[in-house]
Amino acid sequence: MKIGIIDADLMDNGTRHPNLALMKISGYYKEQGHEVKLIYNSYMEVYEYDKIYLSKVFSFTEVPEWVLERDNVEFGGTGFYSDGGDNLDYEIEHHKPDYSLYNEYVEEQLKIGRKRTTLEDYMDYSIGFSTRGCFRQCKFCVNKKYEKAFKHSPIEEFLDEDRPYLYLWDDNFFAYPHWEKILDEIESTGKPFQFRQGLDLRLMTDRKAKRFNNTNYRGDFIFAFDHLKDKDTIIEKIQLWKRYSNKICKLYVLCGFESQDEKDIENTFERIKILMQYGCMPYIMRYEDYKKSKYKSMYIELARWCNQPQFYKKKSFREFCEANQMYKKDQSTKCSAYRTMLDFETDFPDIAAKYFDLKFEDENIYIKQYGYGRKYKNKPLCKGCKKSENCWDEIIKSKGNKHVEKKFIQLYFNKEIDVLCTHYKNSECISTPDEIAKYIIDILLKYSTEELIKILKQSDHSYKEDITKENTILVKELDEIKEILNILIYNKKIDFLELGRKLKFRHGIVDQKDATLKTYAQHYCKFAALLDLVVIDKVGRNSHIEVSDLGKVIYNLDDDQRDNLIKKLLLRIPILRECASVNINYEAFKTLLKKLLV
């Protein structure tokens, strides 16, 4: 039998994604010995086939009625039925997709000059559903067939070993109770992966955040912020996620669904503002009813601004619209973006005043991140610290309490608590960084190295910091650390190269290559960061180095006290802490261990 396959979305509008159901149908019938071919040029080709399978994902995709009326045509998909229609037969649904189905189309597109990156979904990904179903049952979503998440397919069912990446199309992966077992399956393939539908941020837990940030995830992590009523939950879960990640994540922002008026525009702006504050990228998802709105052009310009990171990160909405006007050749008329902004501001000046001048770089509380050497990427949730009484205010308030001091030592040396969290705009502690730094020094002077080691041996297992390449940096000269403090105190704006020159000049070396000087300074700065003496703050491609709150106070102490404190701070390096705890004198760490255990 000669079978024709029609991806109606591809035929009508073009699409960046292959149709998974059609690839499964093709794979099944090819295995049965039938001839199967993708039709993508003309519907008139249907006359050449014994059987036609046609599918479309989008309701707006147009298909000629005469094609659907033919006896040999079977059609389905969410473009025809809100729930996708009848399920595929079991043996087809669980057949390996025919990844070669689109080969001829892809080759043709490449020959006419289309960029390979726009076709990578056809060429580079193994695609499938590891789970199906979602309990949310959102009115705007097509994934309402199954009311709870369940395991659908093992990864090996749709895995093509020759393809470098995995693409999961699950409806709500986090809603499946045994998500971690599936993640184990995914990771066992060794292939980078990503989720197409995004992940349900409202279901984020500490375990999920930690696990996913340690995976080989490809591309941006994508979540959703569909309703302003979820504001408190979204803010809490973003902060939980940011505890483990310093990457800018993306959230879909649905608009034009509940209404298409100025209230919906304001609602959308408010969600954008929240995402700005918590260092996230909004991606405007316009429900098709936005086209009916009086403010249709406003929805368009919002999407143009937010969905292009190079504009959103650098310009306010007003600046974006003004830039569009500036680049217009004929300045005697207004471009659509500038006209849209002015018209909306005239009608709703209060909304414009509240939102049009917001800038990501001004609002983002995560501009100053923990930097190098921190166990976590950003501060914890304040309410979590307060609940466990691990916050700075509680610790400093209990000064002199032996039990609290021991708990603090375990938290601090295991990097469960950090002075830098007080620098965040949303920090709820009223204790100042200077107060905290002095408290740390008082504790370090009060307890001997042996006492510190004994207390650290009793640390809660959940505090344990894994030994990694990043936190196993070692140096030969602790005096160089003191010199770094001296240089940074008097040089507020300095990069690694200049710091390397100053360090080497101290040794009478003036002719080393720039790369060598830079690497030398980086090495010692990273070590100093592990000791909590400097902060290496990652901002874009540049690294900003500065003395930490603790480093500033230690710098002003006398030499003996400074040496004593730096030696004790060596216990912040996990492998040294472990060696000292079990009294192992590994050869590679002998120099530092001797200094530590003196």
Image (tube, grey):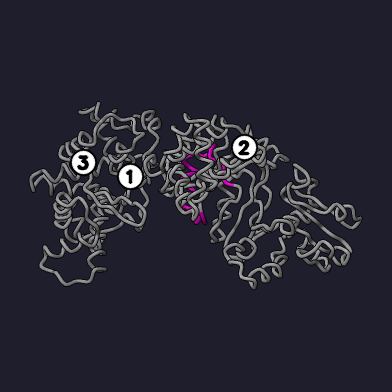
Q: Label 2 sits on what residue type?
A: Gly
Q: Which residues are magenta?
A: 198-219
Residue 565 x, y percent position in the rendering: 16, 45
How many numbered tags mark residues here?
A: 3
Which x, y percent locates residue 281? 48, 45
Q: Secondary structure at mark 1?
A: loop
Crowding at label 2, few (<14), some or many (≥20) Cα neighbours within 10 Å? many
Whether residue 9 can be seen here: yes
The verdict on residue 105 being magenta is no
The amino acid type of the residue labelled 1 equals Lys
Task: Pick the residue in front: 237 or 478.
Answer: 237
To which residue does mark 1 refer? 368
391 in relation to 107, above or below: above
Judged by depth in the image, the label closer to the viewer, 1 or 2, is 2
| Disc number lying in front (3 or 2) | 2
Residue at x-position 21% and y-position 41%: 451
Judged left or right of residue 124, residue 567 is left
- Residue where numbered disc 2 is placed: 256
Secondary structure at numbered mark 2: loop
Q: CA distance from mark 1 to mark 3?
A: 34 Å
In the rendered image, the vertical position of residue 42 relative to residue 179, given as above or below = below
**SS state under label 3:** helix
Q: Give the labeled residue for mark 3.
A: 451
User: In the image, 174: left or right of 553?
Assistant: right
Give the x, y percent position of residue 341. 50, 40
Is 214 magenta? The answer is yes
| Cα distance in 3D space between marks 3 and 2 | 62 Å
Q: Which residue does the image show at 45% across and 46% down from the upper left? A: 322
Question: Label 1: how many residues lie within 10 Å, few (<14), some (14-19) or many (20+)?
Answer: some
Decide: few, some or many residues near mark 3? Use Cα within 10 Å; few <14, some 14-19, many ≥20: few
Earlier in the chain: of badge 1 and badge 3, it is 1
| Residue 551 or residue 492, whichever sits in front | 492
